[in-house]
Amino acid sequence: MDNPENESTPETVPEEAATETAPEEKKICMDTVCRILDSFPSRSRQFLLPLLSKIQNEFRYLPEEVIELVMRELKITRAEIFGVISFYHQYRMSEPGKYIYRLCYGTACFVKGAPIMAEKLKEKYNIGQGETDATKLFTLEFASCLGNCGAAPMAIIGDDSYGNIDPEKTIPICENYSL
């Protein structure tokens, strides 16, 4: 990991540097990233997907400085890593809200009011698909199908499932959640 051209390797980044940056960057511990990297048999691109998954499980998203480190360690280009990140929808480049609001957009849910629910979320929280509200309470994601068409329209908020949602009750349901 010695790289004289780049002073932001884990060995040279002071811990206090993470606390002096934006709030979402406070959680980034490069020692944790190094432990994750060391958990793989080698620094090979064949481990890119499980490596990114482990990192995202730790931080809830893929921070830019971590991506840079992974690029250096696996000797892959920016295009290669971002090609993977953009192809697989589970990877996030920005910190998500405390609760992921998964709104089903399958046929049954769509017909029974999912677009109305999405519009209400847009009006109240100013979020669309893939966006996080300003307070970082909710991140809205559309799901192709949540597998319970008989309960359309439905959504999963965090670990809670809601079915047969009256679109007019979209915001009252959200008011049960707080930072």
Image (cartoon, rainbow, N blue to C red):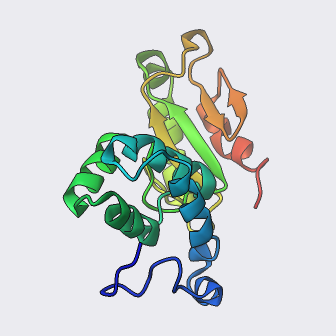
Tell me the residue at 52%/76% (across/down): 10
33 and 107: which is toward the camera: 33
Q: Is residue 116 visible?
A: yes
Please identify the residue farthest to the top as the structure is shown: 150
Residue 28, position in %: x, y? 59, 71
Instruction: Determine whether 40 is above or below 127 in the image.
Output: above
Question: Which residue appears at 58% of the width and 54% of the height?
Answer: 60
Q: Position of residue 54 (x, y in %)?
A: 55, 47
Counting from the top left corner in percent of width and height, residue 123 is at 51, 55
Above/below status of 110 relative to 63: above
Q: Position of residue 170 (x, y in %)?
A: 64, 40
Above/below status of 17 relative to 45 = below
Among the 4 quarters of the image, the one containing residue 27: bottom right
> On the rendered image, what quadrant is the N terminus found in?
bottom left
Q: Who is closer to the viewer here, 2 or 29?
A: 2
- Name the quarter where the C terminus is drawn: bottom right
User: For the point 55% across and 62% down, which residue is it?
Assistant: 33
Q: Which quadrant holds residue 160?
A: top right
